[in-house]
Image (spheres, grey):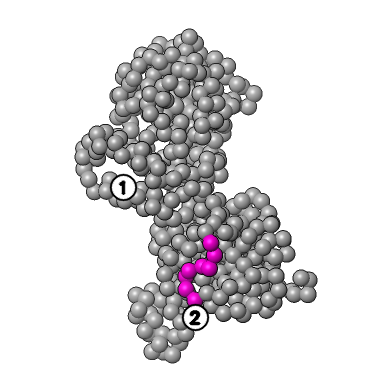
Amino acid sequence: MGHFIVTEKRLLKAKKIESILVDYTGDKIENKKILDIGCGNGEIAWYFLESGNEVHCVDIEDQRNNRENCIFKKVDSEILPYTDNFFDIVFSNHIIEHVGDGALHLSEIRRVLRDNGLCYLATPNRYFPFEIHYRVFLLHWLPNPIFLWLLKKINKFEEDLHLFGYSKLKRTIKKIFFYKEYTHLIAKNPEKFYSTDMVPKSMRGKNLKFLNWISPTNVFVLLKKKGSSMIGNYYILFKRAIGKILPKKVIKFIVDNIMPVFRPIEHKMVKKIEYSQQYYDDNYHTQKGALDKRSFIQVMDFWEKQGFKDELFTVLKQIDIPGDRKLDWLEIACMHGKTVWWIAEKYSNIFFYMFDFSQIAINWVSKNNPIPDRTIVWTGDIVDIRNEENRFEKFFDFISCIDVTEHLPKEIYHQGIKEMYRVLKPGGYLILKQGISVSPEHINVLTEEQLVTDFTNAGFIFVNDLPRRYHLFTKK
């Protein structure tokens, strides 16, 4: 293969794609099955061949400079001529704006990707003032039919173009993929991502997330999670839309009295994610929780408006929590820490210990902690509850494990129960609640009876049921 040399410009583009994928995966891009959609002269595909990858190319015509080793297929639509679950990685590098149906293009990419497969997606941003294909200013901000009509009038038209603005692109992506945005990360560290020719020196080293809206190009890594379901994703979006329309009292009645009948069917419809720290860092806490975008006040106001603070205080009224001595309280998988912050408002004699295995969550809690003198916060795991060398043997007066167990694979779930038993003082209390909503992250939703049984089998003594599906346990 050495006789074919990739030109400098395409080499930089290939290294940029590679560096972004390496940043996302933490691993080299080697021995993968890769599809390059709209391969053009084939130089990017050729670059990845040299790492031992099997590279396939598709385009409307074969324009490759070298036709050895890459497997080429001609296409004339968004439909990809491959079976389901065929590729580890797909490149869609400035292609989606050229196809007639961008949603179908992404859907086909998802179809041919294997579980946990990745797509590198880059496309021009409609809201950048200069349109790079036709080299015109502002005309592309007009409705697309008018824009294309004007191009024909001034004899510039060559082909249809369907540009995506940042918001529309994100909405289209998130229906069927998990994703991570790289536009602002490239601007922050262009040397790392082989983009120094694209980023002015004055912008380097700065975390400018607003660039996602106005950047010349938007860049994403898309992830097809194992077992994720398009039908399930649309169903969840539909439920959320209905939830925004109906009054809260109606929603509460439906959730308490009607939905339990349908939940077993729902859980089968919405397939589950593969549990990993990377998923919770890159998707759950950043996309769903939006911890990288929300302030402390925004997060707390949001959850209080959902009724969670009132629910927690209703539960705490049913528990005898001493106020005349110092108590040590452990919060399992704290996320943004709302449970701790609310309990701290009510009880000044409690010192809190809180951990989460997501570094994103712990960074946010550490940054926004309103009671740093009453908390110890660390990145930890429920299967080994410790902070550095402190293993907290029979240490805690109270443990709260709220909306956690449903996220855990069976083995980790049972090990976590044993760890909570180990660190609870004799005579201490465990406050337990599982989330039962239908979500890709809820991989271990049990009946309440089974939940209680699993904890009593591990040695906990069941005390009583509390309001809103909470359960109270103690330890001899």
**Residue stretch in magenta:** 76-83
Residue 79 covered by magenta stretch: yes
CA gap between label 2 and label 1 equals 43 Å
Q: Secondary structure at mark 2?
A: loop
Which residue lies at the image location 36% right of the left edge and 38% below the top edge? 264
Q: Mainly helix, strand or loop, the magenta region?
A: loop
Q: If the image is split into quadrants, where does the N terminus sit?
A: bottom right
Q: State left or right for residue 250 relative to residue 205.
A: left
User: Which amino acid type is shown beneath numbered disc 2?
Assistant: Arg
Q: Nearer the viewer, residue 136 or 422?
A: 422
**Residue 406 position within the rendered picture, expressed as x and y whole percent measured from the top left:** 44, 34
Which of the two marks, 2 or 1, is nearer to us in this view? Answer: 1
* Residue placed under numbered mark 2 in the picture: 135
Per the image, the residue denoted by label 1 is: 239
For numbered disc 1, what is the local secondary structure?
Answer: helix
- The answer to whether residue 69 is magenta is no
Q: Amino acid at mark 1?
A: Lys
Q: Can you say whether 261 is above or below 60 in the image?
A: above
